[in-house]
Amino acid sequence: MQKIILYTIIIAFSLVTKAVAQEKKEKPISFEKKVEQISSGMEFLLAREKNELKLKIDSLETVFKQNKISVDEFNTLKLKEAEKSANRIELGMERYNQKLDSLIQNKIEIGSKEVSFKIDTINGKKVRTYFKKTNTKHYDIPALKIYKSDEEKAERKSKRTTSQFVFAFGLNNVITEGENLEDSDYRVWGSHFYEWGVTYNSRILKNNNLLHAKYGLSLMYNNLRPTDNRYFVRNGDQTDLVTSTIKFDESRFRNVYLTAPLHLEFDFTPKKLSKDGSKTYFRTHESVRLGIGGYAGVRIKSKQILNYEIDDVKIKERQKGAFNVSDFNYGLSAYLGYGQTSFYVKYDLNPMFKNNNMDQNNVSLGIRFDFN
């Protein structure tokens, strides 16, 4: 009984081993593996010929040292052996190159519709050069878009209404009645604004690319850094800028707004024709652009950030509240640039604080990116 069990196990093991071996045998070798094998063959050919040539040269040197051949004979024989080795290397490399060429061509014909070849001339010899076709998927990271092909990219970018991801940043300050920026209560180079959002660009005229309506939704972050160690304090309906007895490492006041910008955009991008001339494409954001308009929105939050140190203890204080800041903001804005990059300016028509004795209107100047 034990022998029967043992024989059964041996037979089963043999069958499994044979099946695994058969599966491995039938498994096709990948294209990359075949290229690696050809490359290894080339390396082996060079190493073998180099080693054999060295052995033959060493043998000739031994004969020469035994005074069996002259110097001229030694040099002549050494040169002949080197030429023989070079010829063998050239013939071997040619065979490997033919294998590689056949492998790539086979890959083109049956394995990849995106790869093609053309006849080119390199060092006076006609050779096949392989390249990948460009009609493939595109990833436009800044614009957060994916295009399946060149045709889809051209079609979508030429629609009458397109979308853009907008990001802007730069300097931020306020204009106070009777003062100029040189006398500002806020650091000119230390106060910044940021804006990001989504816009839509609609061509107004069907067959003319000049006029566009640009509209969307944005978040605006307006930051002010007071000078002379000051910070904001709310006194009833007034919000005053006062000097602190504590030395601030950082004093920053931020207002965040959700706004709806609207611009009339002049886009001087010329129209384009398809290769066969059958289609007309009206592209945008590829030439000089000028936008004039404005925005309106609501305040989401106001925050004051104070960093200071007391008895070697670093403190970061965040104060959230209304600070008597206007709940709504509206203003004028414009941009001028080329392609997707523009100089950008915006000015709040409403005062920053509701009831202060002097009106202070926020103004921003910076760079704007419209990733189409």
Image: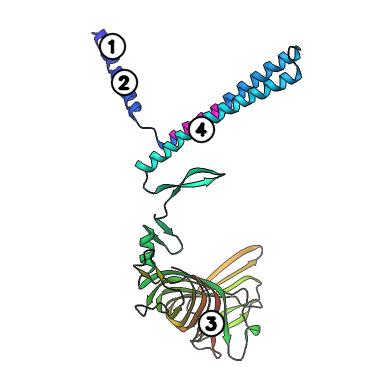
Q: Nearer the viewer, residue 70 or 262?
A: 70
Q: Are marks 1 and 3 in contact (CB under 8 Å)?
A: no
Discs 2/4, front: 4
Above or below, comparing residue 54 to residue 365 in the picture: above
Measure how far apart labels 1 and 2 are at the Cα level.
18 Å
Q: Which badge, 2 or 3, comes first in the chain's sequence?
A: 2
Number of other residues with Cα within 10 Å of mark 3, as a class: few under 14, some 14 to 19, many 20 or more:
many
Task: Give the alpha-carbon distance from disc 2 to disc 4, as whole Å.
Answer: 38 Å
For badge 1, the amino acid type reads Leu
Residue 132 is labelled as: none
The part of the chain drawn in magenta is 34-46
Q: Which is nearer the eye, 70 or 148?
A: 70
Sequence-first tag of 1 and 3 = 1
Check disc 3 and report the residue beneath it.
362
Residue 238 x, y percent position in the rendering: 53, 86
Three-letter residue code for mark 4: Glu
Quick one: label 1 or label 4, which is nearer the N terminus? Answer: 1
- Asked whether residue 305 is drawn in magenta, I would say no
**Mark 1 or 2 closer to N-term?**
1
> Badge 1: few (under 14), some or many (20 or more) residues near its Cα, within 10 Å?
few
SS state under label 2: helix
Answer left or right for 142 relative to 223: left
Q: Which residue is mark 4?
A: 94
Residue 327 showing in the rendered view = no
Q: For numbered disc 4, what is the local secondary structure? A: helix
Q: Which residue is mark 1?
A: 6
Kind of residue at disc 3: Asn
Check disc 4: other Cα within 10 Å, few if <14, some if 14-19, many if 20+: few
